[in-house]
Structures are given as C-alpha cells and as structure tokens.
Amino acid sequence: MDLIDNLANAFAGKEVEKVPAASIVSVALMEGMEKTGAGFPESHTNAEKMVALGESAHKYAGVESINLPFDLAIEAEAMGCTVDLRDANEHIPEITASPFFDDLSGVELCDDFLSNGRIPVVAEACQIAREKYPDVPLISGQIGPFTLLGQIVGIEYLMKCLATNPNEVKVAVNKCADAVIEVVKAYNELDVQGDCMYEPSIAADLLPPEMFDEIVKYPLKRIADAADFNIVLHVCGDTTPILEHTLDLGYNGFSFEDCVNVKEANKIKYDLKSNTQLVGNVATDSLFKGDFESIREESFRALDRGIDILGSSCCVPPGTPLKAMEVLVKARDEYYELGKQETRFKNEKALSWTPSYIDVPLPVANCHNMPEHEERKIKI
C-alpha cells in the first residue's frame, strides 16, 4: 500500500485501500526512546534525535506516519517566553515565564520569529525525515492561536478578559494567528503530508460555544487558508457542542477524543456538506493501559461509524507500550480481512445504524506475533 497516496485520498474524501492507521497527533513513547536512544529533552533540541524518536512508532509499531515535534511550547518560546525542557522522559516542556503575562495589549510578533528558539530545529528535522522516509507521510504540528494566547498571557487572565474585553481578545488572537501562519508557511516548503494544529483551549468548557464565531472563527480560517498541505484541527475534551463550528472552518481534518460519537460527528459533517475528514478517536486510556481488546473494539467502532483516519483520540501518553499502537494498526487490518468495510459503506450511505460488533463477543486483536511487553507482562 502506498502510504502517502492512501492518506492523501483519505483527506480528499476519495476511496482508500484501507482507512489510514496514521497518528495525526503526537506519539513519542518511552519505549521508542529506549530503542532509539533519543529521549527527552535531547529530542526536543537535536534534529537527528527528533527524527529518531519521531520514526520509532512507524518503525517498531507500523504506524503509518512519522510525527514531529513533540511539545506545544515551541511558538511561545519563539515569541520570547522562557521554557523549561525538563529532564524526565515522561514530561514535556512547560512555559515558566512570559514577557506578555497579564498584558493582552503587549502581544506582538517579533521580526525574527522563525529564527528563534527551536523552530529551526523542527525545520531541519522535517528535512531529515523526508529524505530518510520518502514513502511515509510526514506529519508536523504546532499550537493554535487561542491556546497560544492563553500560554503567553496566562489562561486565567485570558478567561477574565473574555468576559470584560472580548474585542481586545480578538485583536490578540489574530496576532497569535499571525505567528501560527508564519509556521504554516514554513511547513509549506518542507513537503509535509499533514499537520496537526492543537487548540485545546477552544473546548466548550473554556471558550463558550456562543463566542466561538466572534473570537476564533476568523483567525482559524486564516490559518487553514494559509496551508498548502492537509491541516488538521485538534481539540481536546467533549467537542460535541462545537462540531458545527469546527467542521465548517475549511480544515482538511478534525481530530477529537473518544467521548465524541463519530456517528453524530458524521451526521453533522454530512448536514454541513463539509469536506473536513474525521480523525481519531481510540481512547488514550486504552492505549496507555495496553488494553488490547478495548483498542480493537474501539477501532472497529470508529471504523463502523465512519472515521476517516484512525488514530489516537489525543496525544499518545509517553508511557504507552509500542505494542498498543501495533494493535491499533492490526485491528484496522483485521477489520478489512473480515470484510467489515462493507458494513462501513452501508453505514456511511445510510448515516444511521447500530454497529454490529455490539452484540458479538470479539476476541483480542490478532497480534500474537508481537513481542510481550516485559514491564506489564500483558498476555494476549
């Protein structure tokens, strides 16, 4: 199977050989770090190590993509924030100081933004990965504008300003969108097949859905329009209340968590006549625990209900066993071996169904050839 063409067809809503089992969200696992010698924090700052870790899920688990970078502090760092990279493999960098804290009016994009911090390292890593793996989809990533604003001014201050001065928030979000667009334009030159823009702070429990159009619709559309590649919007939590917004922004994909019903998302997508493809949504909890039976069942459920690209519901926790990611890929393969794609086609046509697996006891995914995960001693 040509992985790049297959993923491109999925994003285009065309017929695919199989629904891609590609991680659009970040997957940087401790087992991958151990196998490659590319742990944190070195893989955040060294392009070669970033590629070594980024390729590990593809190399050792068959995931149909290579993802990098691995944290959401890169743009804030380039804007002048202080970032603690931390030294434990299970921890990601965090912002510890910002020149814009509690100051919406002071938010500005510096002239040399793309040359600052770790942005050049990510660009170099993309070039290395593309040369090393010309036949594997390369998935880049960056933070979204509203979440970036919350990072640099403080999320509590931003929430207060939403209530007291929404117009100033709109101006600042668009300045942050300018920063994101600069990164997107840089990725346009790097031959990436996809990109994940992480916007966890626009979830309904932070940004009231009734303020979505007023505050973030325009800057999010600007970013989508700037991308010459397939760009995916990812929002954490229960995004059901904002599906009508997120599926109508012009993104090639929308990535969401397992608490969202793919069937409901698909109905909204069809009602909107949206070309945004559905991405996800196998639970990170099932992956982290190495619960193979749940991974298989959740993969089947997502495929039955019309998921367009199968993967994790959110960034894969570093402690997740590589074997769990392999089970996800094998579950996708088994779905087609069993001929269940015919059920999927009927379901997509009808947009109303009861998945057949609910009443059928399912064995664990056919992954008997995988090595046992020594630490967990999981039997399959």
Image (tube, rainbow, N blue to C red):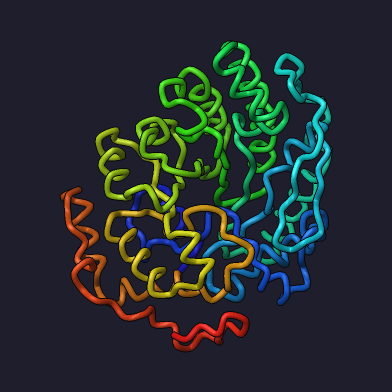
Report whether 277 appears left or right of 162.
left
Q: Position of residue 88 (x, y in %)?
A: 77, 61
Q: Nearer the viewer, residue 230 or 23?
A: 23
Residue at the image position 31 percent from the left and 72 percent from the top: 336
* Up-down relation of residue 360 to residue 146 (above or below): below
State which quadrant residue 127 falls in. bottom right
Q: Position of residue 194 (x, y in %)?
A: 55, 49
How many numbered discs sit on the rendered protein?
A: 0
Q: Nearer the viewer, residue 258 or 310?
A: 258
Report whether 87 appears left or right of 364.
right
Q: Position of residue 39 (x, y in %)?
A: 76, 65
- Quarter of the rendering occupied by the C terminus: bottom left
Residue at the image position 34 percent from the left and 68 percent from the top: 297
Residue at the image position 21 percent from the left and 65 percent from the top: 342
* Up-down relation of residue 221 to residue 234 (above or below): above
* Up-down relation of residue 211 to residue 71 (above or below): above
Q: Position of residue 31 (x, y in %)?
A: 66, 73
State which quadrant residue 360 falls in. bottom left
- Quarter of the rendering occupied by the N terminus: bottom left
Residue at the image position 25 percent from the left and 42 percent from the top: 267
State which quadrant residue 161 falls in. top right
Report whether 313 appears left or right of 87.
left
Q: Nearer the viewer, residue 297 or 190?
A: 297
